[in-house]
Image (tube, helix red, strand yellow):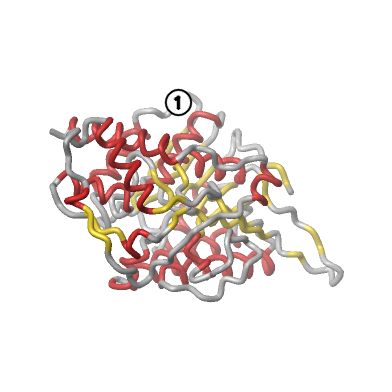
Amino acid sequence: MDKINLNNKTILVTGAAGFIGSNLVMRLFQDVKEATIIGIDNMNDYYDVALKEYRLKELNTTVPEGITWKFIKGDIADKQTIDGIFEKYKPAVVVNLAAQAGVRYSITNPDAYIMSNMIGFYNILEACRHNPVEHLVYASSSSVYGGNKKVPFSTDDRVDNPVSLYAATKKSNELFAHCYSKLYDIPTTGLRFFTVYGPAGRPDMAYFGFTNKLLKGETIQIFNYGNCHRDFTYVDDIVEGVYRVMQGAPGRQKGEDGLPIPPYVVYNIGGGQPESLLDFVQILQEELVRAGVLPVDFDFEAHKKLVPMQPGDVPTTYADATALERDFGFTPNITLREGLRKFAEWYASFYRSKG
């Protein structure tokens, strides 16, 4: 593994106004010295743009002394934009978090996934090919495990059975990265995120969507009759993992044939503690009451409905993150209750301030 000192480096973060991206930039603000951080995001309206603007405002108002922060509103699917950024700023480390997210949306809006997750990632790889990039870190997803029955999910498992287009695009990213690592000796690390949640997250995720619906007095649907388990991972744990991985690139070395051994690796980032959806909903409702989002006498049973599994979903996600622990000394450890408490408190504050 090649150690990378992020101080005094130029770092490109795509999807910088997104949930994980904005939290990562904030972390870089706190811990990296004298760096130039470039963020790009297309600010699309897949979900409430006000949330993206809120995250961006938080970043713009907290830039520390010594850090140069530049945000570009643009799309990674636009090759000219990406080439222009690389030509002008010459990033040493690239973190590609920009993507069209969501399993269900990929069933009805496939074009968005091909453009952002396939064309966009290709543009990033091509730009890395033609510039001296020390490390490309990119977001993959636990969805690549598809209908795998073996748990916990290991990066050594075969992942040839995606059950959604979103999952297929993320697996394709890993294949693209391997190809470019092999052909052009670009160090790449893919990170398979497991159900990321937290304050100012994505409203299409269950914890956020359930909260919105309950507040409106609507009924929430719990799929597979509650017999689903998710390895929920709090956003600070995800960011900690990304931050550590950025500083350790797969080492460049030659094989017996004299050609590069691909400096390529993939890690899971998940807590390794899958929670049932019913337990998750129970904790969420308790924390929403505690934070004053919902009244103490709210009738949850009247607002819950158990329904069958839906297309694109899987019954269980469960991370084997031993490789991350081995190589970077880190395993996600923030409990679901702790994380949902922080979300509920943020939700109460954010929506109270909006009136």
Q: Residue at x 63, y 70 (%)?
A: 179
Structural crowding at the residue carrying mark 1, measured as other residues with C-alpha within 10 Å and reported as few (<14), some (14–19) or many (≥20): some
Q: Nearer the viewer, residue 219 or 166?
A: 219
Q: Pinpoint residue 151: horizontal percent, then vertical percent.
A: 57, 62
Q: Residue at x 32, y 44 (%)?
A: 282
Q: Residue at x 59, y 39 (%)?
A: 9
Residue, disc 1: 64
Name the residue type under label 1. Pro
**Res 141 visible:** no
Seen in the picture, residue 160 relative to 44 is either above or below; the reply is below
Q: Pinpoint residue 239: horizontal percent, then vertical percent.
A: 50, 41
Q: Residue at x 50, y 56 (%)?
A: 139
Q: Nearer the viewer, residue 82 or 114?
A: 114
Seen in the picture, residue 126 relative to 329 is either above or below; the reply is below
Q: Secondary structure at mark 1?
A: loop
Seen in the picture, residue 327 relative to 293 is either above or below; the reply is below
